[in-house]
Image (tube, rainbow, N blue to C red):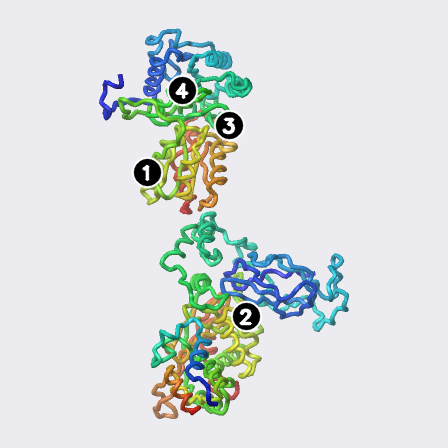
């Protein structure tokens, strides 16, 4: 699964979940749940989409690693790498 | 005489005296002017308007007439066509109906019927309105009817300035002008500039500025309406009061400018509601300012009864301050 | 012959704008088919028919705003001859499909079905389009303000120029970035304001709260989700919905509508799911027959509902069908919420976030996951005692997720 632009994928899927948010204004280190007001359903939809796009298994126990944009990118890159 | 006084000087006077001053001024300035009507000479006028004028100007120019409104109005029309500038006084608007044939079928139409060969530069003055317990033969307000007739002008002086100033301007008109003097105004007193003179007869006047509602009225109802505006002001409602001054032609521009700004209008008209001048004004507002309206147009008119003789019933039949205040509040959604 | 009417999609709806037909004259329709899209304060709503038959003709042009109750199409129902020789249409000569339910029009059989038009309030018949002064209309047109999104301050609720000006004032809707079509947050706010103000004005609420230990439930959920791909995972919210739906079957005094001074209990359980919309909106569309759904179906339905609600596409039945509402603040909220009942419903159940608390289990204190369940209910219909039993039942069910 090389060749996936992880950053681009993550930003696209966050954008799908919260289309009205300008991601350029979001701190990559901020907790997304606070920063762009996403709830557990949004988060599950985001995880589902990232799983579909990257085929990375994302167990619930790893959720805490995915609460920021940078964390999400790092997590997926590590799994894909 | 006027030149003798400084421009800023005023004199306390009454509406009656202001009309008399206007008559005296006109009689003095133009030899073609004469006054005729029932009791205008020896008796001094039914409302004492012409008191003293017979002595001053003589029976040639202050002419008592028989009790025949049609006859002497016709005589006035003839005199006007022949080059004079007659002022015909009809005792009240109720009696003017006896002269309606002359006014409508002759005075208002001759310029048209003669292919512009003849005009009728005639002024007809008459008293109108209720409030003096003169019962149903003397108390009606039919000026709105006359405003229906093309070919004449209809004036309703409500202030000392207009009582003093409208007559001369009317006498300069090439066609008939009817002047309606509300009976309740004759005793009204106030200060009038010593040099008060002719005034325009084309424009309505904004007598009080306001932003919340336009109260449109004329004649005797002006003062009740101004009083209502003061009452409304104590409740934070700023009413604009428009004195129409001329019922024909109507000064649409002043009305629409006001209503477009305030978005609300109540018309106060001592005539009966059905087919009234208030109805005409309301319709014009709808035609010309519909998209500015924020509330239904309101009307305060006389009750549709012959004006009663008993004082309490007469008062109840007429537009009064509480009704005007209530109508304004209704338009503002505060009823 | 049946008239398909502009449905009432909520107690506060007076009119809707027809924006799209999803069928054409001649099309066969059956109960539940989506036949049109209607723009309302709540967004674009897909409207279903409750008739079986064939679309005979449309009565209202697209982009026309009509009052609730206005016939917008004629549906020729089962077994009828066309009243007039039908316009030639491909299906008009086909034999009529056999009726799956040879009953009278089903819309009378199920009380909460929205196609039966109810006047918004008993005092009025069918409401006309919004009463607005010419000045208000002019101003609204100049500034693209939807009059139906305004609350009038004039006589009889007439919208005045000042009402439009208020909207245009400091709170003028800022141009939303990429806001989904069909979502007018200002209009939605107005609708919420109307419904909530009415609720607090008319409904004597009483409130109860109940804390339960959901450690076992959490554990069960974690174990179940551990083996599943993300799109099959369950959320605690789904369990909560199911628990409420099952509990309410035993407590019908919390399920139904209070209308015209009396309560009608509903046999069907359609739980309204309170869904917040970023930027300040809220809707509570129904998950129909919640009690009949398996957890997976329920979770799937909930996801779909959340997605469509946030995209501004809710179906008509979902808007007006809810028989009770559940509001859950999820993992980030506060511990307890006390809801405002959505009229004409009579109850709202709230779930706070799960928190770790010292808890006595079997005589020993230990850390446990605790959730606070609250109930706001209509005291005209039920009393605190029944409410307590209802809450206890919800708690019991939530603690036994394997049985849900």
Q: Which mark is residue C70?
A: none
Do marks 2 and 4 both belong to one polypeptide chain? no
User: Where is residue C37 drawn, in percent x and y?
Assistant: 57, 65
| First reached walking from the N terminus: tag 4 or tag 1 | 4
Can you say which quadrant of the picture contains the N terminus of chain C?
A: bottom right
| Chain of the residue that carries numbered disc 3 in the rendered image | B
Q: Residue at 50% x, 40% y: name it.
A: B287
Residue C5 location, quadrant: bottom right
Residue C202 visible at all: no
Marks 2/4: CA–CA distance:
77 Å
Marks 3/1: CA–CA distance:
32 Å
Q: Which mark is residue C318?
A: 2
Marks 4/3: CA–CA distance:
22 Å
Do marks 1 and 2 both belong to one polypeptide chain? no
Marks 2,4: beta carbons within 8 A? no
Q: Which mark is residue B148?
A: 3
Marks 3,1: beta carbons within 8 A? no
Q: Nearer the viewer, mark 4 or mark 1?
A: 4
């Amino acid at each position: 699964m090389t060749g996936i632009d992880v950053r681009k994928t993550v930003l696209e899927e966050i954008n799908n979940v919260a289309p009205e948010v300008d991601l350029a204004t979001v701190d990559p280190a901020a907790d997304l749940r606070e920063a762009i007001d996403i709830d557990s359903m949004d988060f599950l939809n985001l995880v589902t989409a990232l799983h579909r796009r990257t085929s990375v298994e994302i167990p619930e126990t790893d959720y805490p690693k995915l609460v920021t944009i940078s964390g999400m990118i790092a997590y997926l890159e590590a799994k894909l790498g | 005489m006027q030149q003798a006084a400084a421009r800023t000087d005023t004199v306390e006077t009454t509406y009656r005296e202001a009309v008399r001053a206007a008559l005296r001024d006109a009689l003095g300035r133009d030899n073609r002017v004469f006054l005729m009507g029932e009791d205008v000479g020896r008796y001094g006028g039914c409302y004492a308007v012409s008191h003293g004028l017979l002595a001053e100007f003589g029976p040639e120019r202050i002419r008592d007439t028989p009790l025949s409104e049609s006859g002497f109005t016709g005589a006035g029309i003839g005199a006007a066509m022949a080059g004079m500038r007659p002022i015909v006084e009809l005792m009240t608007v109720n009696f003017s109906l006896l002269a309606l044939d002359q006014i409508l079928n002759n005075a208002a139409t001759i310029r048209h019927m003669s292919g512009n060969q003849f005009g009728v530069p005639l002024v007809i003055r008459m008293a109108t309105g209720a409030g003096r317990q003169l019962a149903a033969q003397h108390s009606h307000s039919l000026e709105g009817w006359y405003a229906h007739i093309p070919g004449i002008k209809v004036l309703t002086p409500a202030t000392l300035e207009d009582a003093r100033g409208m007559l001369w301007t009317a006498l300069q008109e090439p066609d008939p002008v009817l002047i309606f003097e509300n009976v309740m105004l004759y005793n009204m007193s106030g200060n009038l500039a010593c040099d008060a003179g002719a005034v325009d007869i084309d424009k309505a006047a904004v007598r009080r500025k306001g932003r919340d509602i336009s109260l449109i009225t004329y004649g005797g109802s002006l003062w009740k309406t101004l009083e209502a505006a003061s009452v409304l002001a104590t409740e934070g409602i700023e009413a604009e009061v428009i004195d129409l001054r001329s019922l024909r032609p109507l000064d649409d521009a002043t009305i629409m400018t006001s209503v477009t700004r305030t978005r609300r209008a109540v018309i106060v008209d001592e005539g009966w509601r059905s087919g009234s001048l208030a109805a005409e004004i309301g319709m014009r507002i709808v035609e010309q300012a519909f998209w500015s309206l924020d509330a239904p147009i309101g009307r305060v008119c006389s009750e549709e009864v012959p004006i009663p003789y008993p004082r309490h019933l007469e008062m109840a039949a007429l537009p009064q301050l509480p009704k005007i205040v209530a109508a304004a509040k209704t338009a503002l959604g505060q009823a | 012959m049946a008239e398909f009417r502009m449905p009432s999609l909520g107690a506060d709806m007076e009119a809707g704008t027809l924006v799209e037909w999803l069928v054409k004259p001649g099309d066969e329709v059956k109960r539940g088919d989506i036949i049109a899209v209607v723009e309302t304060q709540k967004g674009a709503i897909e409207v279903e028919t409750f008739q079986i038959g064939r679309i005979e003709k449309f009565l209202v042009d697209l982009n026309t705003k009509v009052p609730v109750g206005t016939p917008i199409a004629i549906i020729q129902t089962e077994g009828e001859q066309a009243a007039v020789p039908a316009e030639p249409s491909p299906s008009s000569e086909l034999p009529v499909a056999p009726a799956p339910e040879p009953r009278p029009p089903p819309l009378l059989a199920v009380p909460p079905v929205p196609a039966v038009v109810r006047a918004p309030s008993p005092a009025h018949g069918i409401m006309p389009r919004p009463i607005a002064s010419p000045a208000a209309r002019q101003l609204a047109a100049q500034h693209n303000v939807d009059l139906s999104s305004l609350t009038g301050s004039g006589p009889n609720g007439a919208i005045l120029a000042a009402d439009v000006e208020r909207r245009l004032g400091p709170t003028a809707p800022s141009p939303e970035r990429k806001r989904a079509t069909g979502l007018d947050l200002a209009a939605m706010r107005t609708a919420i304001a109307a419904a909530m103000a009415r609720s607090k004005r008319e409904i004597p609420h009483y409130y109860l709260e109940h804390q339960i230990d959901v450690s076992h439930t959490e554990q069960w959920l974690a174990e179940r989700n551990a083996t599943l791909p993300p799109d099959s995972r369950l959320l605690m919210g789904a369990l909560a919905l199911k628990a409420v739906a099952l509990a309410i079957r035993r407590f019908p005094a919390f399920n139904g509508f209070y209308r015209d001074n009396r309560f009608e209990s509903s046999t069907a359980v359609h739980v309204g799911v309170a869904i917040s919309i970023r930027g300040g909106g809220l809707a509570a569309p129904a998950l129909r027959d919640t009690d009949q759904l398996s957890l997976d179906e329920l979770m799937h339905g909930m996801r779909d509902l959340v997605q469509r609600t946030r995209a501004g596409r809710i179906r008509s039945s979902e808007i007006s069908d809810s028989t009770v509402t559940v509001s859950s603040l999820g993992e980030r909220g506060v511990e307890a919420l006390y809801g405002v009942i959505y009229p004409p419903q009579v109850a709202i159940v709230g779930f706070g976030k799960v928190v770790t608390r010292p808890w006595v289990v079997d005589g020993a204190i230990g850390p446990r996951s605790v959730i606070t369940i609250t109930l706001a209910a209509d005291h005209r219909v039920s009393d605190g005692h029944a409410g307590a039993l209802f809450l206890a039942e919800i708690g019991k069910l939530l603690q036994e997720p394997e049985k849900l």
